Amino acid sequence: MKISINNKLIDRNKKIAQITLYASLALLALGFIWTIRNPEPSQAVVGYLILIPSYILVQVSIYLANRWGKSPRPDEVISLALKGLDDKYSLYTYTTGVPNLLVGPIGIWILNPYHHSGEISFNSSKNKYIQKGGPNILAKYFSQEGLPNISKNSAALKADIRSYFSKNGIQTDEEPQVINIFSSDDVILKIKNAPEVSLKSKKLKDLIRKAAKNNNKSVAIIKQKLPPTN
């Protein structure tokens, strides 16, 4: 498999994630110390003014750490799941309009990784993915392990790649597909009625090989206008 990856972006964001984490912890500690040493109501207000932005910064640092600081990162999960594919496939990591784009005989796939656990199902009437079980309420809230709006995320990714293609003069009749990848060993997927494919990361390569047997889509022209791969 050929790969195009923006290592500069990854390294920069890893540093930002670390700095944000240290800054949030320092600010949080400062707020607690001020509140303890200045219990008078008139002075305690200052402590709260420190604690509130520090709490927001903690949430930001958790988000950045989950995406850039922890290993395997979401993009590493994708790369590992695709290991062994031949050079007919090209993976674009943070070099196009979406984080993970796979182009090959199967067409154009946007690979969207999730680390969430529990039972994931799809409610057709609400057009919404639902999470049951998994982490406790505190972990879902403070560690941001609650399931996001997958349908909304998928629509945004499709719009982003279409915009990228348009800006770069890439014309194709192939409709980009979003494939949701769940990397947790503790996830149970019950989403056969969902509008898009969702599966565990270890089953991704099997899906690709099965799809390639039924399709042999020409994407050579698309690849010529995408970033270079190694």
Image: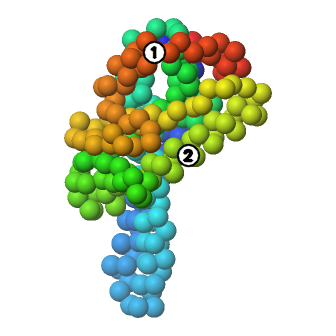
Which amino acid, mark 1? Asn
Question: Which is nearer the N-term, disc 2 or disc 1?
Answer: 2
Q: Is residue 217 above or below residue 44?
A: above
Q: Residue at x 70, y 31 (%)?
A: 165
Residue situated in front as seen by the camera: 75 or 151: 151
Q: Residue at x 44, y 42 (%)?
A: 195
Q: Read off the residue under disc 1.
A: 214
The x, y position of residue 152, in whole percent, is 51, 51
Q: Residue at x 49, y 68 (%)?
A: 53
Q: Which residue is at the far bottom?
A: 41
Q: Read off the residue under disc 2.
A: 155
Q: Secondary structure at mark 2?
A: helix
Q: Residues within 10 Å of mark 2 (few under 14, many from 20)?
A: few
The x, y position of residue 25, in whole percent, is 40, 58
Q: Secondary structure at mark 1?
A: helix
Residue situated in front as seen by the camera: 204 or 37: 204
Residue situated in front as seen by the camera: 57 or 145: 145
Q: CA distance from mark 2 to mark 1?
A: 26 Å
The x, y position of residue 60, in whole percent, is 47, 56
Quick check: can you spot residue 5?
no
The answer to whether residue 18 is left or right of residue 191 is right
